[in-house]
Image (spheres, rainbow, N blue to C red):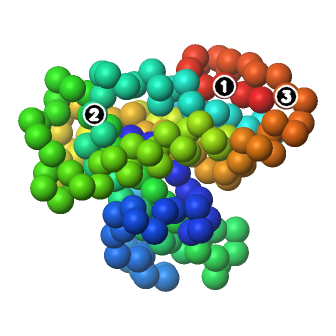
Amino acid sequence: MFQFNVTPGAVPEDLLPVPKEAENSRESGVRKSRRTGRLLFHGGKEKPYSIAHLVESLKGEYVLADVWWQLRHGGQRPDEQYATVRFTLVHRSYYKTGDSSAFKPWRPKAQQVLSQYASEDWWRQVRVFDNPYYENGVEVSGDRCLVINCEVRQPLRSILKADCEVLVPEGIGLLCSA
């Protein structure tokens, strides 16, 4: 699963939204307090990271099964809003045949947006978690989910203006650092 926290203007209008999170809502408090996964990698704010190679390497083995985005509260300032865009990919061996009728029309646009976020943007904070897998709100024993959170977007054009070297950080061999 890839989760991107971006400014609301960075989300295409025709991407599938879910209802906006209410300010100071119970949902927000539960979401922020839930810590069930294990942090595997944390790219600091000193260097931006690209996930382009990682996303490209998943093609063929993984299927984009769902996407949604939501306006949320609680960025740098309490009154600030940001958008969370979440892409769920499933290994082909686990993927249930066929698209849900609700997601099928959104898939081409979702694939385009994921590719755009991966290839045109770098991220000043990347965190990778090994989380339990939940189905209908219940943890599925033995199944795990890799969650890649990308925050603090930096457009590629701003990176190209600087003289940057591409490095591969230890631990996550498919992420590249400038």
Residue 173 picture location, percent across and down? 58, 17
Rendered position, 28 above or below 171: below
Which residue carries the number 2 mark?
Answer: 63
> Of callouts 2 and 1, which one flags the residue occurring earlier in the amino acid sequence?
2
Residue 167 picture location, percent across and down? 74, 19
- Name the residue located 34 percent from the left edge and 63 percent from the top edge: 16
CA distance for labels 2 and 1: 23 Å
Rendered position, 37 above or below 167: below
Residue 163 picture location, percent across and down? 90, 30
Which residue carries the number 1 mark?
Answer: 176
Which residue carries the number 3 mark?
Answer: 164
Disc assigned to residue 107: none
- At label 2, which amino acid type do we have? Val
Q: Taking the image as drawn, is residue 64 in sight?
A: yes
Circle 1: element type: strand
- Name the residue located 18 percent from the left edge and 59 percent from the top edge: 102
CA distance for labels 2 and 3: 33 Å
Q: Quadrant of residue 127?
A: top right
Circle 2: element type: strand
- At label 3, which amino acid type do we have? Cys
Residue 7 relative to residue 70: left or right: right
- Name the residue located 21 percent from the left edge and 26 percent from the top edge: 92
Badges 2 and 1: C-beta atoms under 8 Å apart? Answer: no
- At label 1, which amino acid type do we have? Cys
